Image (cartoon, rainbow, N blue to C red):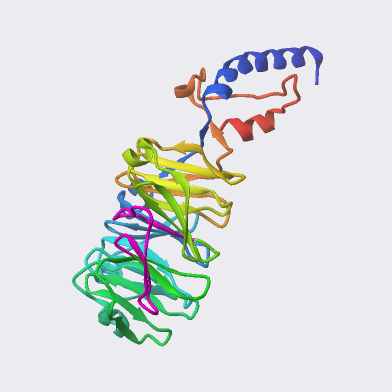
Amino acid sequence: MHKNFQHIYKGVFLQLGVLLIPLLIYSQNPYFKNYTTDDGLAGNIVYHVMQDSKGYIWFATETGVSRFDGNRFVNYTVENGLSANEVLKLFEDSKGRIWFLTYSGKPSYFLDGKLFNMHNDSLVKKLCSRSYFDILLEDKAGNLWLINSGGVIKVDKNNVLSRVSGLPNGIRGFWEDSMGNIRAITGNSYINLSDKSIRKSNYTITGSAPIVRLDDGGILIFSEQGILKYKDNIETLIIRTTNELVERNITDMVMDNNKNLWLCTGNGVMIFGKEGSIWKKAAEYLNDKIISSALHDNENNYWFATIAQGVFFMPSRHVLSYTIDDGLADNIIYSLAEDQKGISGWDLAIKNIIL
């Protein structure tokens, strides 16, 4: 490189560096891509996001479901065979059936490119009810477990449907423990569906508390005192309640692939990481959005479903975006260079600026 040009180039970088210094200190915003109906999403009110075994990302919206392959959306509604358009939850079972639980109480599922509903599938017809199904779980034996206003329904691996009797009202939050027992939350207690035994919680479990199922057979659940871990009849308070947690109204909890805990709330999403034995808040994003669901996909991308604003895609927590809103002189950047500490222009572009 010519020396005179080199001096000019470094001079430009120094000026740019002066502009970037306050940004690096005060403003570190991850890069987000917002997908809405303008991009082909079925609806902007998105209740749930899920990745299937083939890698497709699915979105449950108020006006149908969307399947995303990384480039385009394929949408399904009642016109294509969906039982109802307002889909609240998605679930894939071990047979590859992608279940759509709808607000109307009429489920359907997708298998091998075809939608199955009450008109072309006997199991779906039996499952149709007047109330919304919730908390679909598949146990290790291949049984499906659902809840509606009529109680708990079990569908075995041969598609034989039965109702589980002798249970109290208000069952919610299924999981399978380390011994293979199906358990659930009922009121302020934990119940074993096998022997109907009930163990009262030492904490006040909230009525709308979402559950995170853990690989070790335990769960995380929200209480008035904070977030609990419950495993083998032992409760541990891992994150104590703060005014912020109460005011934000937790809508969902998700454990990502790196064992970080994401809290979806009515005012953005918060991430908690474990430092030793202590859980600490690491970051918060999208604070002006109602986040209904989150997903950490197989390629380490993050997806956040919102109420009314579509879906936000974040490729990494460490890819940061700076614009004029953060104090940058202009959104159009022509060049970057290496500073005196050896940070190259390429590194700076990847780590700190998304054009």
Q: Quadrant of residue 85?
A: bottom left
Q: Is residue 270 above or below residue 133?
A: above
In the rendered structure, which segment of residues is drawn in magenta?
Answer: 186-213
Q: Residue at x 71, y 13 (%)?
A: 8
Q: Nearer the viewer, residue 177 or 109?
A: 177
The verdict on residue 212 being magenta is yes
- Secondary structure mostly seen in magenta is loop
Instruction: Give left or right: position of 330 versus 80.
Output: right
Q: Nearer the viewer, residue 73 or 328?
A: 328
Q: Residue at x 30, y 70 (%)?
A: 147
Q: Is residue 303 above or below residue 26?
A: below
Residue 192 spot, x, y in % from top left = 39, 73
Please identify the quadrant where the C terminus is shown: top right
Instruction: Give left or right: position of 344 versus 92.
Output: right
Residue 235 spot, x, y in % from top left = 46, 57
Q: Is residue 179 visible?
A: yes
Instruction: Give left or right: position of 215 versus 338.
Output: left
Q: Is residue 95 above or below residue 234?
A: below
Q: Residue at x 26, y 79 (%)?
A: 118
The verdict on residue 171 being magenta is no
Residue 211 spot, x, y in % from top left = 40, 58
Residue 7 spot, x, y in % from top left = 75, 12
Q: Is residue 121 visible?
A: no
Q: Is residue 281 above or below residue 105?
A: above
**How many numbered discs sit on the rendered protein?**
0
Q: Nearer the viewer, residue 76 or 237?
A: 237
Please identify the quadrant where the N terminus is shown: top right
Residue most extreme to the left: 130
